[in-house]
Amino acid sequence: MDSPEIPKIIASTSPSSDSPPVQESPVFSYISNLSPIQPVKASHAAQGFPGLSSPPLVFTSPRINTLRETSFLKRPQYPQLSSAEKPKAQDEAKKFVDGPVDSKKHITQLQMGSITDSQDCETNSSSEGVDEYLADPMEMDCTNSAQSVNPCLKESKISYKSEAPSEQATEDLQGKQTFDAKPVKIKELSHGALPSSERPKVGSGISVDNAFNGEYHHGLHNQGFGGEHQDDFDHSPQSPPGRLQIGQVYEDCTENVGGTSKGIIGNMILHAPNKVKNDQGGMHRRCLQFEEAPPCATGKRDSSSIEKVNDSEPPASTAELEIVKVSYAATSKRQMGASLPPLYGGSSPLTVPKPSGIGLHLNSIVNAVPFVRGATTSIKLADHDIGLQVMKSSAVVSHHLSENVRDDTETSIAASSSITQSPHTVEFEHLGSPLEERKSDSQNVDSYKELNQSSSQKKRKRTPSSKDSDGCKRCNCKKTKCLKLYCDCFAAGVYCAETCACQGCFNIPDYEDTVLETRQQIEARNPLAFAPKIVQLEEEIQFTPASARHKRGCNCKKSMCLKKYCECYQVSNTYLYFHVTVFVIFSFSIHPKCHFILKANVGCSSGCRCDGCKNVYGRKGDYGPIDHGVTKDMISDKAGKETFDEKLEMVATKKDALSTELYDSHNHTPLTPSFQCSDHADNVPKSPCLLTSYLRSPESDLTVISSYEKSTRSSLRNSETSGILLETSKELSGMGYYCWQEDYDNIGIADTFSPRYDAAPIICHITPLSDLCSKASASSTSSRSDWKNASQVQLCPESQGLSSNSSLRWCSSPLTPMTRLGGTECSQGLDFDHGLSDIMQEEMPDILKDISATNKSVKVSSPNKKRVSPPHNHNHELGASSSGSLRSGRKFILKAVPSFPPLTPCSSSKGSNTIQSTRNLHDKVFTPGCHCGNFSQLEAEDAKIEIKNHEAFWELTGFGFYRNSEVKRNRARAIP
DNA sequence: GAGTTTGAAACT
DNA sequence: CAGTTTCAAACTC
């Protein structure tokens, strides 16, 4: 996989490969032509795509890291380690690996690829996308943000300072000298690969790719190396303050962020009152992580950074500082790896394992979260902790993904303590290991240091659970040095985190070469070794939960696939507690991992060799629980034999038919298995809700998102009532929270390497509460309401007041027209959960399908042909949860689409008004809520105008099939 | 926390 | 490809 990928990446970066398709996309053209605002973004997105389009390095995450690091890094700073030591460690690793050492070459290639990407990105994104964002009123903040950014950096620096010593101490304690060597090596690589001249660019964060590539690095830069970054920024002519912020934000936010994401991120940040916080928060973690990775933090640096911080800007508010600190604290050396899916994430831009389907790697999933965090503020719902913690100040939502993690309490607590809580409490969530949390609590550097010092030991101690509070997996490898697939981290394409208890770990950024080499070797043996373990088989049903299958299937003999020994079952039980993920769209960085899987529900399949299979999600030989009435028949074949239209029709029909059933009972079986909540409470203590949302963002998608975001933002701003949270949520949603379930259809069909497929722009996941089933009624109640609200909000953002919990609303993907669960409420208990999951499932899958399909098939499908509009009125549907849900998927699409261009030429005044109107239009027109029939006359008129535009747009884009139907409906309403 | 069980990964 | 060994996670006590 990897080897081929590199060249592809480069190629992808080349304008020829990527840009053309993007430009060709109807959406793109439309945007460029119609939308004044978006064109930029669109272009931006398009540009970003190149990175996305870059061949899927899907599983080359390590590479990515290397790329990033090399390209971006200023790691040199880190490394103060003696180069002499480094060789030893390297040698050991190599020996261990036993492979030929081509790592450097490989790395070089990677770097080259990264460089090219970065360049492209820079030119494209920085100039255009960023500027636009800056231009936005919202972005006005950004200009100021330069300042804010600096503070962030400063803060990060500070944190870094504190951390650095600790890290060193820790390592010293462990007696790992190898670490010292590591940084040096990295530096060398980076230097060799990248000319120093280019680095600044990276530092500036202008280049999207770089941001991606350097997830780690960015983090490092931003946080640990804030000083340097600043310098870079300052020096770099290309990085105006605004840009800098964006870039930083972007970087921090995610590995995932692509060029498009930048804009989004930037926007988000801008919006967020406390940009700095958010940015920092998101950034910090990564930064810290990376930074931390290099054990050699020196006091010098720290001091300098601190000074800079102080000098450059007044410290952020205490709250902010705290947050930052917390975030920093949270980051740990290795956590970088854990939190950041270097391999995956990093690779994501370049590589997207789309082909494999929805690959879900447990690890990957977990890892994905971190990315999001940076970019987003997430509300995390833990089993216990349903409370929403939302960054009020920051648009950033941290995600909290966890698999069966019960450690969340710690995290949440820490976060809460550290974070000020507004009605909508804002929180900076750390993926956090307990350590992080603790750090945050104390906020004291000392404490942090202590933690760090003890980190090594702690690692060893390792909690019984293999997963962090974040849900990140921790390995405990003792003999394999984390360079074999035995290591979950390694297998997932991520570096080991600090929380790992592994011994003699080489799966760390310092040993990139080794890691890469090893990976190559393994891949040589088995190209799919790093592929997502869960894949949707082309031939399998798409809608059934079972559609997602374990790549190879299990071989259980004694566990009957009822224990975690079984990979299929294991995956199926993986769930996110709660998470709202916003993936920065551009993602290049989108990882397959980014998927948020509420629930995988992976059943055993014929591919399994298990004996006595009792996998609740599907037994060997059958495709699992498929009572939904959705059968393979229903699903068009992935091969793309069927036309998209046909598929849609089929789906719609099925959905309609099923809708009743779904909402009537608990059977909210989502069409997509993945979303199903496990009915098998028995097996799954917590109802695992894996939401596998896959973000694949075609260029058009990206564009849309960005534009949408803008509009959303502005609108949000206007709507004061909604409050920050709302803004955040919307922004997030605007950002492209497409809660997409992976498009199975597309997966099969889509060219894995096709740019379109590549990055998933953003993922907004709302993960249902963890333990939906198990949660206490109290929590459930709140959560329910939240969800309900959320759904409503989406539907009718304006209509409903935002509650503190509103944050959750956005959790539901903005795109998702979440139908109201059961009308007003979700059923209780499991029902609720199911409802959520169902919603998610339905929506997500649909969206994904639709989007993906549209994206891919847009050209093919003519709007007219595709009218998939269900027989029902949307209005009714909206009212009727069941039908609505089913359709929601499509509606989602609509929503997402609307975001694109402010369709309105109609809107007399563009700018905020226009945006707003657009948004409203979206909401009304596109959102189910709107459909509900809340049009005012004024709106109706606007709608008329807009409808025209929209129609044209839709027709143009191919979304028309959706759009048209709705438009017509709306028209009917709007027009007296 | 130690020991056992289990099945994937690695090896032959 | 099959069988065996190694490994680390999952599980049990």
Image: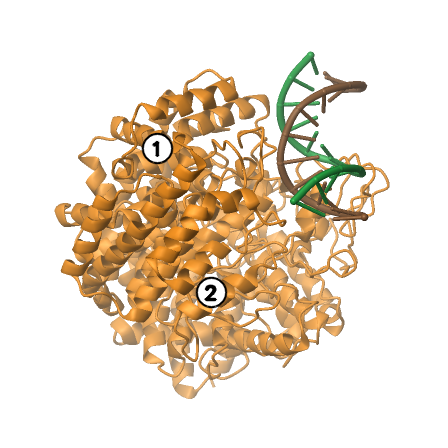
Chain colours: A orange, B green, C brown
Q: Position of residue A57 (x, y in %)?
A: 46, 35
Left/right of residue A739 with respect to residue A89 in the rendered view: right
Q: In the image shown, does A407 or A586 lie closer to the viewer?
A: A407
Q: Report whether A262 appears left or right of A347.
A: left
Quadrant of the image occupied by residue A317: bottom left
Q: Amino acid at mark 2?
A: Ala
Quarter of the rendering containing residue A119: top left
Residue A121: x percent and y percent?
29, 43
Mark carried by residue A180: 1
Instruction: For residue A148, say whether it is visible.
Output: yes
- How much space separates mark 2 and mark 1, taking CA atoms? 31 Å
For the point 52% across and 70% down, the residue is A966
Q: What residue does disc 2 label?
A: A414
Q: Secondary structure at mark 1?
A: helix
A793 lies above or below A212? below
Q: Position of residue A705 (x, y in %)?
A: 40, 59
Residue drawn at the location 40% of the way across and 68% of the way down: A418
Subunit of mark 2?
A
* Residue A541 visible, this angle: no
What residue is rendered at 68% in x and 52% in y?
A573
C-beta proximity under 8 Å, tags 2 and 1: no
Q: Is residue A953 above or below residue A369?
A: below
Q: Is residue A768 left or right of residue A858?
A: right
